[in-house]
Image (tube, grey):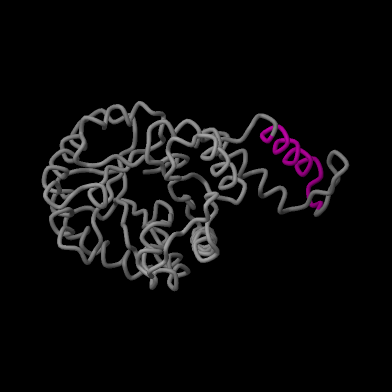
């Protein structure tokens, strides 16, 4: 979906349609209607029907993404058959393992008339997935962005946890986060940070989201409506940041051809200009 903002993407269980409208009112840039982890096996059919019902509504103020089940699951064909009669704004693929996963899903979607639906892979949920993160640049045209997860991977390798007691990631999962960020940049798509599970800790969320924005992520996923405004604020440049970015752009426009300039007593160069333009783009989107 061209021009879709991706600051906050709020998960909503697909079998809880009574939550859909409240989630849409949260201020989240997009909703991820879930068919995977949050929906029990005996509720999958009901969840599909509920999601198809909301996707069939003509008025859609908030983009609606659908997280399907993994490609090797027993539920994937039914998920895709249901989506064939709908128009999701994007499809979220869990347990993705690089470009081959995207190609396999794309082939199944084309058979169902969904060749234009952008894809958002969750790119670090299996051990093998970590080794193919660089391959997403080969299928960048099919991607809405790239995100990661810190829950399935430790379970897959037998780790006790992915976080320290203070909430910081342990080194293996900090690496997975960083590699996802670089893989998205290499593919030229939006890097989306993972969820902050402690949904009652809004101060902790604000710190985490600010760090994600600082590191170069374009947005992050959410699991509770109260998280959306905090995430949006973190990924919307402040007036001070916008003013500084404009000053950098103006300085280079006034000195075409210059490689290095001085602004407010500090040296600025082309990387600063690139970052300033990105800040202004995000400000316009926000």
Given residues 105 and 252, the one toward you in this image is 105
Left or right of 105, for residue 204:
right
Q: Position of residue 216 (x, y in %)?
A: 58, 50
The residue most toward the right is: 265
The number of numbered badges drawn on the structure is 0
Instruction: State the quadrant of the N terminus.
Output: top left
Main SS type for the magenta part? helix
Left or right of 56, for residue 29:
right
Q: Position of residue 191 (x, y in %)?
A: 49, 52
- The residue drawn where x is 71% and y is 36% is 246
Given residues 123 and 173, the one toward you in this image is 173
Q: Position of residue 183 (x, y in %)?
A: 50, 63
In magenta segment, residue 164: no
- The residue drawn where x is 16% and y is 58% is 75
In magenta segment, residue 243: yes
Q: Position of residue 98 (x, y in %)?
A: 38, 68
- The residue drawn where x is 40% and y is 51% is 144
Left or right of 227, for residue 53:
left
- The residue drawn where x is 39% and y is 69% is 129
Q: Which residues are magenta?
A: 241-258
Is 23 above or below relative to 209? above
Left or right of 56, for residue 181:
right
Given residues 231 and 284, the one toward you in this image is 231
């Amino acid at each position: 979906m061209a021009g879709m903002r991706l600051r906050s993407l709020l998960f909503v269980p697909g079998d809880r349609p009574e939550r859909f409208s409240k989630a849409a009112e949260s201020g989240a840039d997009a909703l991820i209607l879930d068919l995977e982890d949050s929906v029990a096996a005996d509720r999958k059919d009901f969840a599909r029907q509920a999601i198809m019902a909301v996707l069939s509504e003509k008025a859609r103020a908030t983009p609606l993404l659908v997280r399907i089940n993994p490609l090797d699951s027993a539920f994937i064909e039914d998920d895709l058959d249901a989506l064939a009669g709908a128009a999701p704004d994007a499809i979220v693929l869990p347990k993705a393992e690089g470009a081959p996963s995207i190609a396999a899903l794309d082939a199944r979607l084309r058979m169902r008339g969904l060749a234009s639906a952008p894809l958002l892979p969750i790119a670090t949920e299996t051990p093998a997935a970590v080794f193919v993160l660089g391959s997403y640049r080969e299928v960048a045209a099919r991607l809405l962005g790239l995100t990661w997860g810190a829950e399935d991977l430790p379970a897959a390798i037998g780790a006790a946890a992915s976080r320290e007691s203070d909430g910081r990631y342990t080194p293996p999962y900090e690496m997975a986060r960083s590699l996802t960020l670089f893989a998205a940049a290499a593919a030229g798509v939006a890097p989306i940070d993972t969820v902050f599970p402690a949904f009652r800790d809004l101060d902790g969320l604000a710190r985490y989201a600010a760090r994600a924005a600082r590191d170069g992520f374009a947005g992050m996923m959410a699991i509770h409506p109260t998280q959306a405004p905090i995430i949006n604020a973190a990924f919307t440049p402040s007036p001070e940041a916008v003013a500084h970015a404009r000053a950098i752009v103006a300085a280079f426009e006034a000195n075409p051809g210059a490689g290095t300039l001085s602004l407010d007593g500090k040296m600025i160069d082309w990387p600063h200009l690139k970052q300033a333009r990105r800040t202004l783009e995000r400000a316009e989107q926000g």
